[in-house]
Image (cartoon, rainbow, N blue to C red):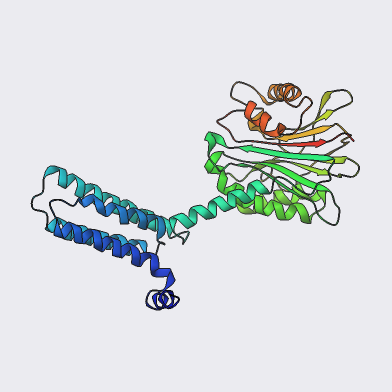
């Protein structure tokens, strides 16, 4: 039993095995078309063509499409008659072959098959989402993040990155809103999330936004700007610092008074001007307090400006977070904001002893 896979690997290299099986399937369907030309449907060749577009790499796919087209030519020559319906089916098949060829040329820029390329994007998306929640905070803390993209697509221009450098033990977290929305901003978000994740854990809190600004300026993107809010929190004492780069301000719930305080730190949008300065707002999260960091999709719509949106968000937070902070980030994101814009929110809560 073990000799068969070894012999198969010698005859057909692993990288060509999928192509071999697809060619065998194409030959089998072509044989049926040649034996029973009036009965077997020409559209049967769509099956290997579709599978090839999903499974073959950009180097193999064009040659496989040519093979399918040759098989189709042989099958056409055996047709007893060419009715208008048959001509239409042939036209559609050749059109599909052309579409797959164009797709293979576009994939050559990435160099991977369709299914593999999609899995790579999904993996990158999952990495972005996983960077948003630090799992090693002390038991007295709750950290939640929620993200929704415009139109409900898996990719968004809003993202969250968090880390706890071993040398300080602090929570370093940044909420970023990349220019654009949905898939248009998703590719830039993929790149920035990795870069910001490296900067966030390697630099002192006061240097992060300046370094992020320099990084964006070096990219020379047509829409090369982003807004961000950076939180640096000491989980032991509850002391925190917030720095802002053209982003909606952080909001703190003071459990003692039940009131919300908006922390208006100032700073320019990232990627627009060099040598930018970012002011800092310092505070303390005491037991029972909470802090909200969010993007403008949560508070801004065409019919409402940011200030009114913040007031509405805090009013909803009073209701949705009353007595229960678990799952609060998801509840707030689902209840607020525009579904035509990306939305992200981070909830940091210090539990009572």
Above/below status of 94 relative to 31? above
Q: Residue at x 55, y 31 (%)?
A: 340
Where residue 236 sits, quadrant-wise, is: top right
Above/below status of 24 relative to 341? below
Q: Nearer the viewer, residue 134 or 186?
A: 134
Q: Position of residue 280 (x, y in %)?
A: 83, 40
Q: Residue at x 48, y 59 (%)?
A: 110
Q: Residue at x 12, y 51 (%)?
A: 38
Name the residue at the front extreme.
1
Above/below status of 349 relative to 102? above
Q: Position of residue 158 (x, y in %)?
A: 63, 41
Q: Nearer the viewer, residue 257 or 141?
A: 141
Q: What is the quadrant of the N terminus in the image?
A: bottom left
Query: Is residue 168 at least partly visible in the picture?
Result: yes
Q: Nearer the viewer, residue 2 or 49?
A: 2
Q: Position of residue 182 (x, y in %)?
A: 55, 39
Above/below status of 339 relative to 170? above
Direction from residue 343 to residue 293 in the image, left or right: right
Direction from residue 236 to residue 3 in the image, left or right: left
Q: What is the quadrant of the C terminus in the image?
A: top right
Q: Nearer the viewer, residue 300 or 271?
A: 300
Direction from residue 199 to residue 337 in the image, left or right: left
Q: Position of residue 8 (x, y in %)?
A: 39, 75
Query: Is residue 244 at least partly visible in the picture?
Result: no
Where residue 77 sits, quadrant-wise, is: bottom left
Direction from residue 96 to residue 5 in the image, left or right: right
What is the number of callouts on the image? 0
């Amino acid at each position: 039993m073990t000799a068969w896979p070894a012999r198969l690997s010698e005859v057909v290299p692993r990288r060509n095995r999928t192509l071999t099986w697809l060619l065998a399937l194409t030959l089998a369907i072509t044989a049926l078309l040649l034996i029973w030309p009036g009965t077997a449907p020409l559209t049967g060749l769509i099956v290997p063509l579709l599978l090839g577009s999903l499974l073959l790499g950009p180097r193999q796919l064009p040659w496989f499409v040519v093979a399918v087209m040759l098989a189709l030519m042989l099958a056409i020559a055996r047709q007893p008659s060419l009715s208008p319906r048959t001509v239409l089916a042939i036209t559609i098949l050749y059109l599909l072959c052309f579409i797959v060829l164009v797709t293979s040329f576009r994939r050559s820029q990435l160099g991977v098959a369709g299914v593999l390329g999609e899995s790579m994007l999904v993996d990158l998306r999952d990495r972005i989402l996983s960077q948003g929640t630090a799992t090693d905070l002390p038991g007295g803390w709750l950290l939640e993040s929620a993200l929704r993209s415009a139109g409900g697509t898996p990719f968004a221009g809003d993202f969250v990155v968090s880390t706890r450098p071993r040398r300080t033990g602090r929570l370093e977290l940044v909420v970023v809103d990349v220019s654009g929305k949905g898939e248009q901003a998703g590719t830039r978000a993929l790149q920035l999330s990795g870069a910001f994740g490296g900067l966030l854990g390697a630099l002192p809190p006061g240097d992060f936004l300046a370094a992020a600004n320099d990084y964006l300026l070096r990219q020379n993107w047509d829409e090369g700007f982003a807004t961000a809010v950076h939180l640096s929190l000491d989980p032991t004492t509850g002391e925190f610092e917030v720095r802002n780069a053209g982003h909606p301000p952080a909001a703190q719930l003071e459990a003692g008074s039940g009131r919300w305080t908006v922390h208006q730190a100032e700073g320019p949008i990232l990627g627009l001007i060099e040598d930018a300065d970012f002011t800092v707002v310092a505070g303390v999260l005491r037991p029972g307090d909470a802090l909200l960091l969010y993007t403008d999709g949560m508070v801004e719509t065409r019919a409402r400006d940011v200030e009114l949106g913040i007031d509405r968000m805090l009013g909803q937070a009073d209701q949705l977070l009353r007595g229960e902070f678990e799952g609060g980030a998801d509840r707030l994101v689902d209840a607020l904001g525009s579904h035509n814009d990306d939305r992200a929110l981070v909830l940091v809560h210090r539990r009572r002893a």
